Amino acid sequence: MTSPRRSRSQEAKRQAYRQVVLDCAEELLAAGGIDAARVEDIAAAAGIAPRTLYSVFASKTQIVAETVERRRVALIEYAAQRAAAGTTAFEMLRLSVRGASEFFLQHPNYLKMELFDSRAWADENASTSITWYHTFEAHTRLFTRAIAEGEVRPGEPKAFARALLAIQQSQLAHWVSEGMARDREAVIADIESLLVHAFAAQVPAVHHEIGHGSARHAPPPAR
């Protein structure tokens, strides 16, 4: 019979293996994509034998799913925390997008994983993740409120939510394709600028043109 202390020790070891495997898997998946990453390579990078890896994960599919989903959950939480500081629906939307963009830029391996499959973030058929639906529905609700409050021009909230996801994906993909050298705040500033110009009922004055990396916007005034 296994003692409680030994059981706790074994579980702690399993969790340690799980964490290092997920970290190594994220790096390998970002480098070559899901198809190119082999379980043997992930195990080698983690410094464990494949049989040890399989004692923690049932399959490569599980490794990939957990690698992606742990970041997605953290992404949703981070964006929600940022959005909570907003005082209007449009400001909450802008802060949510800023938060999500910050998270992606702080975790470039995860960002590359999301981009590697060439899936369109605006297409719900491209993802089965509950966190994707959470983001899409949250954006849709905020667009609905912002339109009603007069901060966003009239339109279809779901269509706006899709367009916003496409804007964010294209800007982040460009950052990756250019070697990730550009200042992260400049990337976020451009995403915010495009958000405001695409959807705001009134576009506030900007300090610089989009693309120069220093545009700053205040949200449209509440009505």
Image (spheres, rainbow, N blue to C red):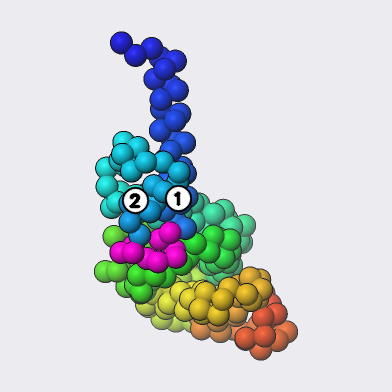
Q: Write down the residue under mark 2.
A: 40
Residue 70, given in percent of the width and then of the height, sits at: 43, 50
Q: Earlier in the sequence, mark 2 or mark 1?
A: 2
In magenta, the rendered stretch is: 28-36
Quadrant of the image occupied by residue 136: bottom left
Residue under the image location 55 percent in, 80 percent down: 178
Residue under the image location 58 percent in, 73 percent down: 180
Q: Write down the residue under mark 1.
A: 45
Residue neighbourhood size for the residue with mark 1, other residues' Cα within 10 Å, grouped as few (<14), some (14–19), many (≥20): some
Q: Quadrant of the N terminus?
A: top left
Tell me the element at label 2. helix
Q: Residue 139, relative to residue 199: is it above or below?
A: above
Quadrant of the image occupied by residue 14: top left
Residue occupying the far bottom of the picture: 209
Residue neighbourhood size for the residue with mark 2, other residues' Cα within 10 Å, grouped as few (<14), some (14–19), many (≥20): some
Front residue of 53 and 94: 53
The kind of residue tagged 1 is: Ala
Whether residue 1 appears in this view of the structure is: yes
Residue 222, given in percent of the width and then of the height, sits at: 61, 71
Residue under the image location 54 percent in, 54 percent down: 78
Front residue of 205 and 71: 71
Front residue of 52 and 168: 52
Residue 142, given in percent of the width and then of the height, sits at: 47, 66
